[in-house]
Amino acid sequence: MMQVDIQIYLKSLKDYFYKNPDSKEQILSKFPDVEFENFMVEVERLAIHNYDLTGDPTISKKQILDILQILHTQTMKDGLQELVDDGSLDVQKDPQGIPQVRLTPEFKKELGHLKIFQLSTVGPICLN
């Protein structure tokens, strides 16, 4: 069972965002791929952690930014994995073990048919 202090903190935070949609919009504006519900799940997790550590569930501005960055990074990772899974990207490790991401030849051909891309020696360039 979650502590009452944590429940009150989370309820007032959610109420604030629902009553002030501009604030919610502002906090998520730099991370448009982050869903508010996922953000609040992480806020809850961190509020519990803070409460266990200090007795106060309040999360800091830095913690809010950390949550947003983690969720954004996870979304990007998931998107890249989808491109790898569908054969658009190939991931290989260089001799130092650093992953190198490249477009597959098949995907390069697909991009070549689109008029908004120009193929070059460094890869496709978007001509928008």
Image (cartoon, rainbow, N blue to C red):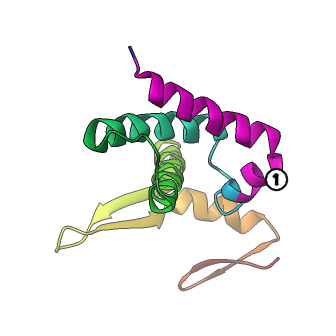
Residue 77: % across, % down: 46, 51
Count of number-bearing discs: 1
* Label 1: few (<14), some (14–19) or many (≥20) C-alpha neighbours in 10 Å: few
Magenta residues: mostly which secondary structure?
A: helix
In the rendered view, tell whether residue 105 sits above or below residue 83: below
Q: Which residue is mark 1?
A: 22
Residue type indicated by callout 1: Asp
Q: Quadrant of the N terminus?
A: top left
Residue 43: % across, % down: 49, 41
Q: Residue at x 72, y 41 (%)?
A: 16
Residue 13: % across, % down: 63, 39
Q: Which residues are magenta?
A: 2-26
Residue nearer the viewer, 108 or 55 = 55
Residue nearer the viewer, 65 or 121 = 65
Based on the picture, tell me whether residue 17 belongs to the magenta stretch: yes
Based on the picture, tell me whether residue 99 belongs to the magenta stretch: no
Side of 92 where 36 appears, left or right: right
In the rendered view, tell whether residue 44 sits above or below residue 76: above
Q: Residue furthest bottom?
A: 121
Residue 87: % across, % down: 50, 48
Q: Quadrant of residue 30?
A: bottom right
Classify mark 1: helix, strand or loop. Answer: helix
Q: Residue at x 19, y 67 (%)?
A: 97
Side of 78 where 111 appears, left or right: right
Side of 84 where 116 appears, left or right: right
Side of 40 where 45 appears, left or right: left
Q: Quadrant of residue 31?
A: bottom right
